Image (spheres, rainbow, N blue to C red):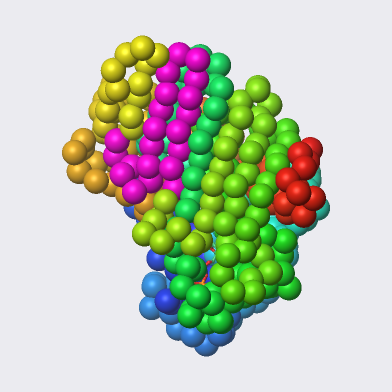
Amino acid sequence: MTRLKWGMIGGGEGSQIGPAHRISASLDGHFQLTAAALDIDPERGKSYAVQLGVAEDRAYGNWQEMLAGERDRPDRLDLVTIATPNATHFEISRAFLEAGFHVLCEKPLTMTADEAEQIVAITSETGRICAVNYGYSGYPLVRQMRAMVAEGELGRIRLIKAEFAHGFHADAEEADNPRIRWRYDPEQAGTSAVFADAGIHAFHMACFVAGQTPTELSADFASMVGDRQLEDDAMINIRLSDGALCRLWTSAIAVGRMHGLTLQVFGEKGGLSWQQQHPEQLHWTPLNGRTQILERGDAALSPQAVRASRIPIGHAEGMPVAFANIYHDLAEVLRAKKLGSAADPLALDYPTALDGLWSMRAIEAAAKSAKSGGAWVGM
Ligand code: NAI
């Protein structure tokens, strides 16, 4: 199996998410880092790329040079990951998609729903893939939840409780630290802070597991620390297309919560409960029955969950493996495209530009609703 050629923009040395992508993309041996523009500082980016094994002539100072250098090569990149700050995602994704590359973009896909619409339109016109890294949907037991809902084991879904609450922006003494302050500045962050940054993962996961799209939402935003102009806490009610109601709480001031991404799904025949900090167990309670613990790695789980597991039951996998499942899916789809064959249907659950668009619509609708006293806003 030859490795697919992989390019990376952003995610340079010391970045938060760059290492997770490199571990995930290489985990199954599918991708070889072949070209990169890793850093806002051109020299630092080039030298780090070479350190990571990229040939000198494919280690670029910025993404424009990378596009110019890569677009006409016969040994073209199979996938380009974009892991730069949010405001650059639209411009870079558009340029690479239009040049015929497949893209995996970090979330949020864009800064506005209008831009996300444009990306979706480009993918339809060009047939290129634009995946969005809602990487937590790659956890085996998240895929198990989705499969159980799709199989009808929970019956009609009535209610979903989704949370992504952490406490890392709770310290009022730190509010002016530039690394935190920009996140609450509308000029730099857009219309929403914690919902756009963290809550959006919970939003995506709720829709992904339910297999439903949102129809309308009502939001209450709060700014609890200092003079922040954007929300550091939000409670959002979302109505989904098949009648489910999602209640979503997201926060950056929940002291003691770490990476508090959780999902509970309540259907007419049973309920599921999963926490990202304990991702190896899924609690399943059939109506009027006892709660069972489903373990990641159990061969009796759904084919989707089995495909997404690597290590035997009882040994923790974790977040880079969840992200690796997005790369695993993309490798399957990209190879099928090259061969002109059909991809494994189990590989088609990776998040796409359409998911990125729903997220941008949700962010805009939530900001609008919060400004109008929590009025329901259609999506
Ligand atoms: P960061 O600030 O830690 O790192 C950004 C990296 O991009 C740095 O290496 C910087 O030099 C480089 N960079 C900046 N502008 C660039 C440009 N124009 N061209 C090339 N390189 C450039 O940021 P972090 O936290 O790694 O976030 C990056 C993206 O990943 C954001 O969009 C963020 O929302 C997303 N993210 C996603 C997560 C997830 O769970 N899916 C988790 C954390 C971040």
Q: Is residue 262 magenta?
A: yes
- Residue 343 in view here: no
Q: Position of residue 356 (x, y in %)?
A: 65, 48
Q: Is residue 42 magenta?
A: no
Toward the viewer: 188 or 49?
188
Is 162 left or right of 281, judged from the image as shown?
A: right
Is 194 left or right of 19, judged from the image as shown?
A: right
Seen in the picture, residue 155 relative to 214 is either above or below; the reply is: above
Q: Which residues are magenta?
A: 261-281
Q: Quadrant of ligand 1?
A: bottom right
Q: Position of residue 229 (x, y in %)?
A: 68, 69
Residue positioned 42% across, 76% down in the render: 14
Quadrant of the snapshot with the N terminus: top left
Q: Position of residue 268 (x, y in %)?
A: 50, 15
Is 213 left or right of 263, judged from the image as shown?
A: right
- Residue 244 in view here: yes
Q: Position of residue 299 (x, y in %)?
A: 26, 25
Instruction: Work out which residue is located at the far bottom of the displayed protein and give it.
Output: 43
Residue positioned 57% across, 37% down in the render: 247
Q: Main secondary structure of the magenta part?
A: strand
Seen in the picture, residue 163 relative to 192 is either above or below; the reply is: above
Residue positioned 38% across, 25% down in the render: 303
Seen in the picture, residue 49 relative to 292 is either above or below; the reply is: below
Toward the viewer: 325 or 73?
325
Which of the 4 quarters of the picture holds residue 97? bottom right
Is 362 left or right of 308, judged from the image as shown?
A: right
Which of the 4 quarters of the picture holds residue 270? top left
